[in-house]
Amino acid sequence: MRKDAEAMNDTRWPEITFWRLVFLVLAATGTVVAILRYSRGLGATTNLSDQFPWGLWIGFDVLTGVGLAAGGFTITAVVHLFNLKRFTPIVRPTVLTAFLGYVFVILALLFDLGQPHRIWHAIVMWNPRSVMFEVAWCVMLYTTVLALEFSPIVFERLNLERPRRIVRAISVPLVIVGVILSTLHQSSLGSLYLIVPMKLHPLWYSPLLPVFFFVSAMAAGLAMVIVESSLCQRAFNHHLEMDLLEPLGRAMVVVLSVYGILRVQDLARRGALLGLRRPGYEGSMFLLEMGLGVLLPIILLAIPRVRARQPGLVTGAFLAILGFVMHRLNVSVTGMERAAGVAYFPSWMEIALSLALVAAGFAVFGLAVRYLPIFPEAPHRASGVEAPAWLLARSASMVAGGSPEPLSPPSAPAGVK
Amino acid sequence: MKGAILFDSTKCIGCEACVAACKEKHDLPAAIDPKLTAYTWTVVEQRNKAFVRRLCMHCESPTCVSVCPVEAFRKEPSGPVVYDASRCIGCRYCIMACPFDVPKYQWDRTTPIVQKCNMCADRIAVGKEPACAAVCPTGATIFGDRDQLIGEARVRLKAAPTTYVPHIYGLEEVGGTSVLMLSSVPFPSLGIRPDLPVTPLPTLTWKALSKVPDVVVVGGALLYGIWWITNRRIRVQEALAQEAAKKG
Amino acid sequence: MRQGWRTGAAWLAGAILALGGQAAAQQLRLPPDLAYAKAEGSPGNVIFSHQFHVPVSEKCTACHVTLFRMLTPTRTVTHVEMEAGRSCGACHNDRMAFGPTDAAGCGRCHVGEGRSSREPGTGANARVAASHETPAPH
């Protein structure tokens, strides 16, 4: 009885922990920036200009966000098409990550577009010769596919047997469509830059940009699964399936090697490697990207002893993600600066909004894990009556991994199952 | 007739009549920005003792037309590349992609649109020449049929080979433009890009985009095939296991 | 302020080299002299000459398009406007150039035909469009 009362108190006034505070600060700043962005325009809130029309919100929120969500199509393909059913336990969190990733990419776009209320124009006003048009359609369709792939989890929670069976019946075609759509738009994000051969630095411009974007997204998607599982382990005391993640690490070695070899070979063929003998600004960024984000993770993950243990595996995966983020930012920012004639560094508001979106992604993930059967083997505990603010702060802290206390759900009030 | 503008830098005295006329024609704020902006669609720059105009080049195969996801840009048969603000979603791909850095954004507004020279398409439609060409007191900017202007440019180059650098800028750059330029100093020294390919830039993205149907069809068949094989293998194994169980 | 000084200096130079300046301006394709519409009681049409005024500034933007439009016919100009520093009064203000109350009299500007504005039709006929527009070549 006294415990119940304590829990109720806890519901009203959650304990302020470090990560909850971080989340609340990020969410509050993000909200302020969002208001400023819509009331005063892009010029007042961003460091974008006619010389530099695409900045952090495209380079990070969109290009990186979509890429990091690539785990969704690789893992579903592995499980449902290649029938490697032992990976089934990681399908749900991966699909959830992917779905949230795409939803937040679309949200970010709503901040970046100058006319966000016209985002639907791409549905009715077609220009099939535009890469952007293709990306728009693929993202739209693939987000729908991900929503459908995720829906059985919701139906399961709500005990809706019929819709669940319907979605299950079309699951294989859904996965096939998802893989195709992903292949198309992951590569097309690279194709966006094919049109600027004289603006993008030769270290990054290549006719193979779409291939690079696709292959690097596959590696990043796998790396995300590993890092995310590790975060979940810390936040939810969810046990780490090393027997599943270790093979992903091995797959990453293959994919990253293919990617690295393609990149270097392409640079050599175009004679762009010569510029690295005395690396300037771009050269240093390139070496950092390839050394820290491609070569080092390959080496780490290729060593069985390192790969088999959690710290090594997670470090390798984390470095690969870092390299991936650097590649996208190098393409969209570093490589474009020289031609633009101006240096671009995002404004604090651009950074704050991006961080807020990431934080919101973590928070929603945490909420979903708490209330939906994301990790099916561990029975979820749910009660639907907590105050929303508590939920947000709580789940954010959980996902961010800073919550020291083990997951102990507040006991459900009488009458609620 | 395919309308075009011929700008002869050797005749330009930098009087900016074209700038003023453009401002009047398009009801733009009178203040003249030193570079192209959403509110100044053409400028006259002085470089190396020569004057050069900046304006939309009105490409024959325009990059902006190809990159815009909602087809806000259109190449008119009469020459101009025009922009329909009511379609624009504000993705700014046109600004990022234009090889001449022409489209500009209204950064000071909350719901900005892209702005650029439209070669006074409405004037051309009623048989007038663009405002800049109409007011140019020296004939540095003239308007006419593209083929005829190319002929005129060739005549000028031939008549005064020592005056001009032997190049008609815009004849072939990115597949040709509807603004042609002549100069007495090398074009790079006028701040004009010398490194543009002869092939239109949209062919670069089209190479990738045209593979979309292949990816869909081949990819779909391949993935279905993989599923079919792996799934069947599992079914067969299951059936064998069942049979073995029955017998056993 | 800086602009005003520059324009003033340019005008001085222009005035001294008026003849030479006019010779240079003659090579330019300028609109013909234009007669402003004559208001009631006006001593005569004001005739504006680009030939004379172009040497004042290297830039057409000294007057266009802030003071005068180029493509659409210019309207009438009133002394009220001039005294407010607009239109011709932006320069013809007794400081940069002689002003509306110049000692040399109204005739410095009002040089046009039909000094009597009572003559029927004159006012309307004098409304010559002052436009840079030239007929399109095609």
Image (cartoon, rainbow, N blue to C red):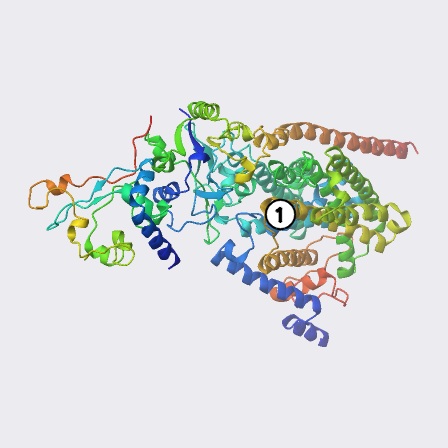
In terms of image quadrants, where is residue B203? top right
Q: Position of residue B106 (x, y in %)?
A: 46, 49
A110 to the left or right of C47: right
Which subunit holds the residue at mark 1? A
In terms of image quadrants, where is residue A380? bottom right
Q: Nearer the viewer, residue A50 or A251?
A: A50
Locate the C terminus of chain B and report the quarter of the image it occupies.
top right
Q: Position of residue A298 (x, y in %)?
A: 83, 45
Q: Position of residue A177 (x, y in %)?
A: 66, 36
Q: Position of residue A285 (x, y in %)?
A: 72, 49
Locate the N terminus of chain B and report the quarter of the image it occupies.
top left
Is residue B27 among the parts visible in the rendering? no
Which residue reaches farthest bottom? A2
**Vertically, is C16 above or below B56?**
below
B50 to the left or right of C73: right
Q: Nearer the viewer, residue B130 or B7?
A: B7
Instruction: Count neighbours of disc 1 (C-alpha within 10 A) and say few if under 14, some if 14 to 19, many if 20 or more.
Output: many
**Vertically, is C54 above or below B6?**
below
Which structural element holds mark 1? Answer: helix
B13 to the left or right of B223: left
Which residue is tagged 1?
Answer: A337
Q: As shown in the figure, which amino acid type bears the numbered disc 1?
A: Glu
**Vertically, is B222 above or below A133?**
above
Q: Residue at x 70, y 47 (%)?
A: A282
Q: Nearer the viewer, residue C1 or A154?
A: C1
A48 to the left or right of B236: left
